[in-house]
Image: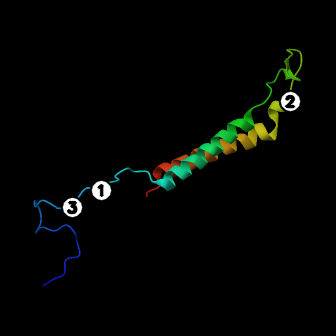
Amino acid sequence: MSKKTNKFSADNFGKETTEAPKENSFYFGKENFKWMLIGFAFIVVGFLLMMGADANTVDGKYDPNSWNDGIFSIRRIRIAPLFVVIGFCIEVYAILKRK
């Protein structure tokens, strides 16, 4: 007699299975939500790092005759978008990760 290694065979085709459905059939587990929160934190920090005065604001007041070079800082054009992109990558990982 051969040992059955496969759960599905021609012998039990069409027969009703007696397996009970799983209680928790939700796709995301605790690990997924942890990674989602980490990704969300990266995105929020990235947007907070992008904040600052606009090009025509000097000392908190709008002046159309002046120019603020602060909009071209490394923090606002390199680091902050990098945080946002990393955050979105973490979110994709959190969604695709299996339990």
Looking at the image, tell me whether mark 1 or mark 2 is earlier in sequence order.
1
Instruction: Name the disc covering residue 93, or none.
Output: none
Instruction: Name the disc covering residue 22, or none.
Output: 1
The amino acid on which the numbered mark 3 sits, given as a three-letter code, is Glu
Provide the residue designation for mark 3.
19
Residue drawn at (68%, 36%) of the image? 47
In the picture shown, does residue 98 fall above or below 58? below
* Circle 3 or circle 2, nearest the eye: 3
Q: Residue lying furthest bottom in this view?
A: 1
Q: Secondary structure at mark 2?
A: helix
Residue drawn at (17%, 61%) of the image? 18
Q: Secondary structure at mark 3?
A: loop
The amino acid on which the numbered mark 2 sits, given as a three-letter code, is Asp
Q: Position of residue 97 (x, y in %)?
A: 47, 55
Number of callouts: 3
Which quarter shows the N terminus?
Answer: bottom left
Q: Position of residue 96 (x, y in %)?
A: 46, 51
Provide the residue designation for mark 2.
69
Other residues around mark 3 within 10 Å, as few (<14) / some (14–19) / many (≥20): few
* Residue 39 in sight here: yes
Residue drawn at (80%, 26%) of the image? 53
